Image: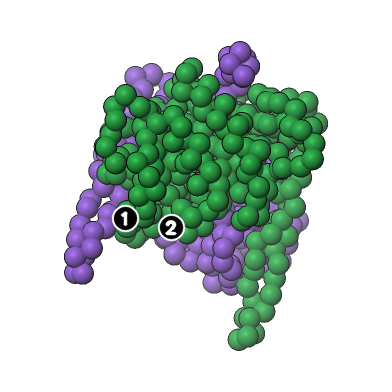
Chain colours: A purple, B green
Amino acid sequence: MVDKKDRPLILVTNDDGIDSKGINELAIIASNFGNVYVVAPDKPQSGMSSAITLESIIRCNLHENVNSNIVKYSCTGTPVDCVKLAINKILPRKPDLVLSGINHGSNSSINVIYSGTMAAAFEGCLEKIPSIGFSLLDYSSNADFNHCTEIVHSIVEKILNNGLENGVCLNVNIPKKSNENIKGIKICRQADANWIEEFDERVDPKKLNYFWLTGTFVNYDSGNDTDEQALKENYISIVPVKYDLTDHNSISSLKKIF
Amino acid sequence: MVDKKDRPLILVTNDDGIDSKGINELAIIASNFGNVYVVAPDKPQSGMSSAITLESIIRCNLHENVNSNIVKYSCTGTPVDCVKLAINKILPRKPDLVLSGINHGSNSSINVIYSGTMAAAFEGCLEKIPSIGFSLLDYSSNADFNHCTEIVHSIVEKILNNGLENGVCLNVNIPKKSNENIKGIKICRQADANWIEEFDERVDPKKLNYFWLTGTFVNYDSGNDTDEQALKENYISIVPVKYDLTDHNSISSLKKIF
């Protein structure tokens, strides 16, 4: 693909894998705005957070020349590996925008910590590139993304025009397709929620036990300004998230103890 | 091990693996304060961040009964899997403290995002348990931890006595052993730093190319109140970190755009 310098260069990635429906939808939307490089994991990498591959090698190969605006590279690593490799080795220059998703399933509230989708957006943000993670509240591999097109298009357009503050990226969650119309967009904070684990303990044919990680999501937060509340009311939630994890409010109280 | 209810129950984990020197040091220090369950990965899991195992099974087995105060379980999963499994399946009750480390290598500034050690501390914090991640600025598998004993002992004692605010855990980094005395403890913020990737591109015997992820750490932050600065001056750095990733300052400016 020729790097047309008058058009934005957009990196698209995800954690569901390069052939998932959500990333293809996102690449098509992105190609309305610029030249798109999809650099994404060759297999599902959900729940990989900001994991990086330190103990083994990474391979990354051309997957498909979709059209004159979209080229796809498949990578054996994690979502964060994909972003690092894309920026450093695959793309002709630093991209103008990093888009991650559209994830099959919610990345609202505490899911932001475990999400490979959002980790990829963080990574773009760390490189001082405006970055957005998109998720649809539908885990199905064949989820209906039709209602997402206009929403994602409009958010990408706004961020290309307005930029984002350094150190901040966006966590966008979109309600599942339903008969009810989506009410609009709410800028929110991350709800204080958690997973209550319920490990499924089993015995294998050799009589050895093993576990599957499962759990139930619990929202402890009754605030009206959270992403969970917005989604419950059928709004799109946008949470500005940052990679400075310091709890600045605790610094003075800790200084009294130490 | 009998659960002596008059003594604190302490969970110890790490990302370097159950047989690393650092976790053994930490377990011994912890056993001065309470009954210790070590539940840790069976192999190195550095750079695993908050990754969780969703696509495959997890095994967790008794590894060693060290003495009447320390028992060790080895787990095939990530550091976060270990904490989840420990709290839900292995320990007799919810622990009073989660300690992670002592990591072989720094987890200061941006490393907090990729670190499995700190992810385990986050996970304890999410469960509303006081949690601390300890790291030594020495990557060697045979690192000298002698100077850490007194420091770690004192920090654990302070947190057992004072607790920690809900939603906040500590990222403690300790300078490498040297002839110079450590100057003390500084409560800091996370420095604004990043890794500049330098992928090492090679060709395998089948003439196919592959990559090793390497990089150079760059500190962009000239502040005097950062963890990087404290460590440079031979202080121990303690950063209070939180899992609410919302950038609350951006909410009002984003509301003007959307």
> Is residue A190 visible to us here?
no
Mark 1 vs 2, N-terminal side? 2
Q: Which mark is residue B217?
A: none
- The local crowd at label 1, few if under 14, some if 14 to 19, many if 20 or more residues have their Cα within 10 Å, is some
Q: Secondary structure at mark 1?
A: strand
Where's the N terminus of chain B, which quadrant? top left
Residue at the (62%, 19%) spot, across then down: A258
**In the displayed structure, would residue B173 be above or below residue A32?**
above
What residue sits right under mark 1 in the picture?
A: B61
| Chain ID at mark 1 | B
Please indicate whether residue A129 sits to the left or right of residue A176 in the image: right
Is A163 in front, or is B79? B79
- Which residue is at a point 53% across and 21% down the rendered structure image? B158
Q: Is residue B219 visible?
A: yes
Query: Label 2 amino acid?
Result: Asp
Q: Residue at x 56, y 59 (%)?
A: A53
Residue A146 x %, y %: 38, 49
Within the image, what quadrant is residue A196 found in?
Answer: top left
Kindly identify the amino acid type of the residue bearing the numbered disc 1: Asn
On the image, the x and y values in percent for residue B44 come to: 51, 57
In the displayed image of the protein, which residue is found farthest to the front?
Answer: B67
Above-or-below relation of A128 to B196: above
Percent of width and height locating residue B15: 51, 50
Residue B79, x across and y down, in percent: 45, 48
